[in-house]
Image: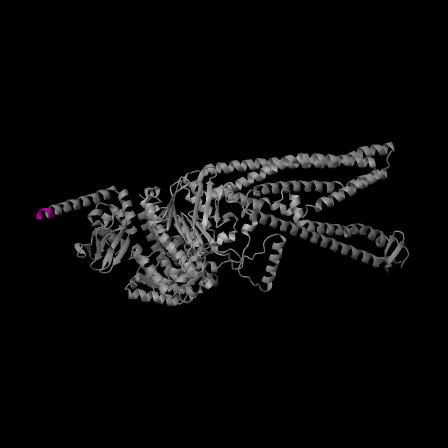
Amino acid sequence: MEPSLARYIWTHTKKQQVWILIIVLLSMIPYFMSFDLPKLIVNGPIQGSGFEQPGATRPFMKLHYNVPFIGEVQFFSGFQLDRKETLFALSLVFLLLVVINGLFKLYINTYKGRLGERMLRRIRFDLVDRVLRFPPVYFKRVKSAEVATMVKDEVEPLGGFIGDAFLQPVLLGGQALTAMLFIMVQNVWLGMIAVVIVVIQIVLIPRMRRRLIVLGRERQLTARALSGRVGEIVDGIGAVHVHDTSNYERADIAARLGLIFKIRFDLYQWKFMVKFLNNFLAQLTPFLFYMIGGYLVIQGRLDVGQLVAVISAYKDLPGPMKELIDWDQARQDVQVKYQQVVEQFTVDGLIEPRIGALTIDDPAPMTNPLSAIGVSIEDDGGAMLLDRISLQVKPGETVALVSTATGGAEALAEAFARLNWPASGKVASGADDLLELPEAVTGRRMSYASSDVFLFQASLRDNLLYGLKHAPLTPVTYDGAAADQHRWNMHEARRSGNPDLDIHSDWINYASAGATGPHDLFEAVRRVLDAVVLSRDILDLGLRSSANLTRHTELARRIVELRAALRTRLEQEGLSGLVVPFEPGAYNKEATIGENLLFGAAAGPKLADRALAANPYFASVLKEAGLDRTLYEMGMEIAEQAIELFADLPPDHQFFQQLAFMTAEEIPAYETLLQRLKNRPYEAVSENDRAMIVTLSFAYIEPRHRFGLLSDELMSKIVAARNRFYENLPPELQDAIERYDPAKYIAAATVMDNVLFGRVGNSHPDAPDRIRSIVYDILDELGLYAELLDVGLDFNVGSGGRRLTGGQRQKLDVARALLKRPDFLILNRPLSALDHRMQEKVLRNVLEAARCDGHSPAIVWVVTNPAMAAMFDRVVVFDSGQLVEDGTHETLLAGNGIFKELLS
Amino acid sequence: MLLKDEVGMLQRIPLFSGIESTKLKLLAFTSDRVSYSAGQILFRQGDEGDAAYVILSGSADILVDSDSGPIKIAEMVPNSIVGEIAILCNSSRTATVRAASPVEALRIRKDHFLRLMREYPEMTIEILRVLADRLSHTTADLIDARSAK
C-alpha cells in the first residue's frame, strides 16, 4: 500500500478530486452574484435610483460585454421593467440564487461524503484483503482484536477527510491569497505586517504540532493495545477465573486506561495551547494595524480611507487561515493514523494475489505425488522442528506418520497444508512448488484437518459446507426493487475497488462433494457424518431443538403420522406405559401442574416460567376455576417440604439438581416468605406473595415428588381451568401460547416434545434412552431421518464452536475435510480429544469412506497412537526432527527400531 | 406410595436404621421411584454399577451367569437393598437382578449415595457393619463348602 496518504487518495480519486474542484469553482459564480444583489435591490427599486421619473423603466437582464478590440457587444437588450416590477424580478433572482447556492452545496457535500465513504470502503477492503494474504507466521504475532480495531476504528477518520483532501487547501489558500493581495493593493507596508504575521503562523504552528503528532501516534498505539488486551481477556476468560487473576487483569486495564488518559489529556492541553497561540497571532495583526496605521495617519503619512480599507480587507484573512490550519491539523492526524495502519499491514512475504485468485472451474485432480524435498522447518525461536526431510507420498497411498514427542511429524503435515512454510527445501506436487500453486488447486484437491479446529459462529451446516464454498457458482436473478438494489451494490463495489462477487449466490461446490445439487448433497453429508460418528450427536441436537418450520415443512406436515407411529410402536413393544400422551380433556400425571393448566407451549416470555403465576389473566382464570386458594395451599406445603429437606444443605450441593421448585439461591427468600405467611389468612396475602407461592405448585409432578398433593377432584378442576383459559384468551396473549393440539405441530416446542406429544414416565429409569432410539427408528422408517438431521444441522455452534464439545469439533473438522473428496487428505492428529477406541473407530470409517465410488485419495495421517498405524499401507516414523523409519507396518514391526519401541 | 411411606420403609432397612428421618427423607426425595413389570431386568451382570435399589414392593431374583445358564442365588423381598456393592467398589455388577413380580423400587444414584456416606459417618459405619456381617457369612459358607468337599 502507498505509504503516503495523499498519494493513496490522489491515485484512486484524482478524477473525482478535479471534478469536485471544478464544481466548487463554478459554485462561486452564483455565490458572488448573490453578494452583489442586495445592493442592487436596495439602491435600485427600493431607494429608487434610476426610477426618478414616474413610470420610468430600466432594462432587466440586459446582456452586454466589452469584448477587447471589437468594443461593446450587446447580446440581449433586456426587458423593460418599471420600479415595482424590477423589485419583484430582482427579489425572485435573489431567491433563485439562494436555491442554486443551496443545491450546489447539497451536491458538493453529498459528492464529498460519497467520495470519502468509497475511499474508506476501499481502504478497509484493502486491509482485509491483506489479512487474507499474510504469511502464516504473521498470525503468531498479532492479536486478532488489534487487527480488527485497525480495520474498523483507526481508518474511520479518513473517510471524513478524503473529500476535503485537495479541495480545502486550494479553496482556502485561494481565499487567503486574495485577501492578502487586496491588503497589499491598499497599502504595501501594512500588507507586509500581515504577511510577516502569517509567515510566523505558518512556521510556528506546524512546529508546535509536531508534539501533537507524536502524542497522536501514542494514543493510537495504546488504544490498539487496549483492544488487543480486551480481546485477550475475552478469549482467555477461563484462565483468568481458574487462576484468580481477575484483579491482575483489572489492574492491567486500569493502568492502560491511565496511560491513555494521560496521553489524551496531554493532547488536549497542547491542542488548546496551539489554538490559543494561533488566535493570538491572528488578533495581533489588527492590533498592529490600529497602532502603526493609526500612528501613520496621525503623522499624516497615510489617509484614513486607506487604513479603513485595509482593516476591512483584513477581516477576510483570519477565517480562511484558521480553517487552513485546521485542515492541516486534520491532515496530519489522518496521515499519522494511516501510516500507523499501513506499517502494520506491510509485511514481507505477502501471498501473491494470483495464488488466491477466483477460479470458477474446478482444477484437474492432482495426479502427481506429493513430496517434501529437503524440508527444514524452524519454530519461531529458531529451533529445528524438521531437519532436511525428504518424503514422497504417492497418489492413493495411505501413510501413517508416527512421531515421538519431538518428532516433527505435525510440522510436516502443516507444511503439506501450507500452514507452515519451510525454512529451506520445498514441498512439491510433482515438479511444482506447492506454495506456488493457486489455492484453487490446493484448497479443492487437498484437505486438511487438525486437532486445532476453528469453527465459525454459524450453524453446523454452514461450518460443514464451508470447505465447499470456493466461488459463486450460480448467477442469482433479482426482480424489481431487488434487481435495482443489486445493480447499485455491484456498481458501488466496483467504484470502491471491492470485488463484485455475490454473497447470495450459491457458493457450494456440489460436484466436489459428489453431488449434483442441494437435493442430493444430503447423502454425501450423511455419509461423512456417519464416518466420523457424529450423526447421532446431531440427531440428538435436532431432537432437542425446535425446528424452523419454514425450512423443515415435512416434519410439521407429517407430525400426526409420526405421533401415531410412535403410539403403535410403543403398544407393539408393550411399552405404552413409558409415555403418557397429552389429551385435551385429561390430566397428564407425568406432566407438571403448570403444563396441565396451560396445555400449550409458551412462545415468548409472557407466559413462560415465573411470569405465568404473575400474569393477571392467568390469575383470574385460576380464581374463577376455584383453584387459586388450592394452589396457594399446595405451594405453601411444597415450600415447607422443600425447605425442610434442603435448608441446611450448602448451595452448591448436587441434590439441588433434584429440586425442581426453586434454586438454591431462592431458598433463603422462601424461608422468610414462609415465616411471614404462615398462619396468615389467604385473603391477607398480597398478590405478589401469592404468585411467589403459587408458582411453586406449577412445577409439581405427583409420581416424581410424591408429596401426595394431587387428588382426582383437583385434577378435574385443573382440566376445567385449562378450557376456561383458552375460551377467553385475550388477543394480546394469543401469540404468547401455542395450544397442544394432537393434529398440529407446535412450533415453540422441541422436535422430541412434538413427536412424543406427552411426557415420559418418571418410573422407568431407562425410558428416555429407549424412547429416543424408538423415535430414531420411526423417523428412519417414515423417511424423516434426513429431515431431523437437517434440523440438527441448524444448531448454531457458538463463538469458535464452543457450544460443541472438543471431540465434536474435531469430528466436524474431519467430516469437513472428507466432504470435498480430495486427492490428498492430510490429517494432523485430528481426533486427539477422543479416546483411543473412538479414534480407531473413526479412523477405520474415514479410511473406508474416503475410498467411495472409485475415488481413492492419498491419506497422510499423523497418528496419536502408534497402534493405529496398522491400518495404513505405509508407516513413516519421526524422531528428533529426523525421518528414522519408513516401510510397511510388518517390516517396521519386524525391525528393531523406534517404532517397535513406541508400540511396546 | 408417598414420600413419607418410603421413609418408613427405608427406616426398616438395617443399613439406614440409624439415620435420622429427615436425612432419609432427603435420600428418598433425591432418589427416583422406579417400577418394573415381572421379568424386567433391573441391571445385568457385568454392567457398570451406577445405582443401588431399595425394593419397596414385589420381589426380584438375583441371578448369576454360569456355563449352564443363569442360576438364581437369592431373592430380594421388600425392604431389602441390592446393588450397593458395585457402587461402593466401582466394580461392575456381580449379578443380574430380574423382577419376579411387579416391583416398585427406589433407585439411589451412586453419586448421591457416596455423598450421603461422606456426610453421615453413622450411615457409613452402619454400612460397614452390614458388609462385615455379610463377609463373615460368606466366609462361613466357604468353610462349609470346603469341608463338604
Quadrant of the rendering where the C terminus of chain A is positioned = top left
Quadrant of the rendering where the N terminus of chain A is positioned = top right
Number of marks in the rendered image: 0
Could you tell me residue A469's position as x and y percent?
50, 56
Residue B147 lies in the magenta-colored region? yes
User: Could you say which is closer to the camera, residue A99 or residue A467?
Assistant: A467
Residue A299 lies in the magenta-colored region? no
User: Could you say which is closer to the camera, residue B78 or residue B66?
Assistant: B66
User: Could you say which is closer to the camera, residue A859 or residue A775?
Assistant: A859
Could you tell me residue A562's position as x and y percent?
37, 66
Quadrant of residue A849 in the image?
bottom left
Q: Is residue A246 above or below residue B16?
A: above
User: Could you say which is closer to the camera, residue A220 or residue A403?
Assistant: A403
Q: Is residue A249 left or right of residue B96?
A: right
Question: Residue at point 55% right, 52% down?
Answer: A357
Question: Residue at point 81% right, 41% down?
Answer: A182
Q: Is residue B134 left or right of residue A844?
A: left
Q: Is residue A505 left or right of residue B4?
A: right
Could you tell me residue B92's position as x and y percent?
25, 49
Q: Is residue A26 left or right of residue A401?
A: right
Could you tell me residue A52's position as x and y percent?
90, 55
- The part of the chain drawn in magenta is B145-149
Outermost residue on the right side: it is A53
Tell me, yes or no, if residue A103 can be seen here.
yes
Q: Main secondary structure of the magenta part?
A: helix
Question: Residue at point 73% right, 44% down?
Answer: A172
